Image (cartoon, rainbow, N blue to C red):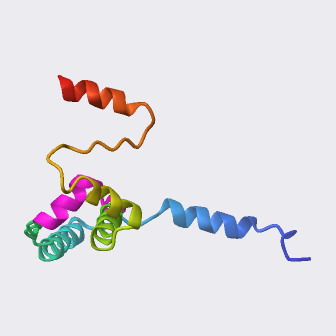
């Protein structure tokens, strides 16, 4: 129905003859094409750019692990600044407790650490 059932042997023989007798380009044509291609290629060659010097800030960010690590540092810094400016009452009491004495005040946050600190303090 689509016309595929016809026998096109005569047409196929013409195509085979055309494929077998492909014209060869002349040496002059090939030389001109190559010369033109070399001229275009030389004109389109990219000029090597100097790389911009890396800023010290960028080197620091890369050294600490990139922007995720930088975000953590900034968060910790802001939290420390906040606690330094406006400390909670518990931290205020700890700071005042040792302010008037000449002795060092040891505050243990973990149970059982006091003995280790005393051993270190005595020598």
Q: Which residue of the protein is positioned furthest toward the front in this rendering? A: 100
Res. 54 visible in picture: no
- Position in image of residue 16 (x %, y %): 59, 61
Displayed quadrant of residue 113: top left
Tell me: 103 left or right of 87.
left
**Start-end of magenta stretch:** 56-69
> Relative to residue 113, is residue 107 depicted above or below?
below
Tell me: 74 left or right of 32.
right
- Position in image of residue 102 (x %, y %): 14, 47
Magenta-drawn stretch contains 66: yes
In the image, what residue occupies the spot 8% across and 66% down? 53
Q: Main secondary structure of the magenta part?
A: helix
Displayed quadrant of residue 62: bottom left
Res. 85 visible in picture: yes
- Position in image of residue 47 (x %, y %): 10, 72
Tell me: 22 left or right of 42.
right
- Position in image of residue 45 (x %, y %): 15, 71
Q: Which residue of the protein is positioned furthest toward the right in this rendering? A: 1
In the image, what residue occupies the spot 26% across and 24% down? 119
In the image, what residue occupies the spot 30% across and 64% down? 80
The residue closer to the viewer here, 9 or 55, is 55
Quadrant position of the C terminus in the picture: top left
The residue closer to the viewer here, 77 or 40, is 77
Magenta-drawn stretch contains 123: no
In the image, what residue occupies the spot 28% across and 55% down? 97
Quadrant position of the N terminus in the picture: bottom right
């Amino acid at each position: 129905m689509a016309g595929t059932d016809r026998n096109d042997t005569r047409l196929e023989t013409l195509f085979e003859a055309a494929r077998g007798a492909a014209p060869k380009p002349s040496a002059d044509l090939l030389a001109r094409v190559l010369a033109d291609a070399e001229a275009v290629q030389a004109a389109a060659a990219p000029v090597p750019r100097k790389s911009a010097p890396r800023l010290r800030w960028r080197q620091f960010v890369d050294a600490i692990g990139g922007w995720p690590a930088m975000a953590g540092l900034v968060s910790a810094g802001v939290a420390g600044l906040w606690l330094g400016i406006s400390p909670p009452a518990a931290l205020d009491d700890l700071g005042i407790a040792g302010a008037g004495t000449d002795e060092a005040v040891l505050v243990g946050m973990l149970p059982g650490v006091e003995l280790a600190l005393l051993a270190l303090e005595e020598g």
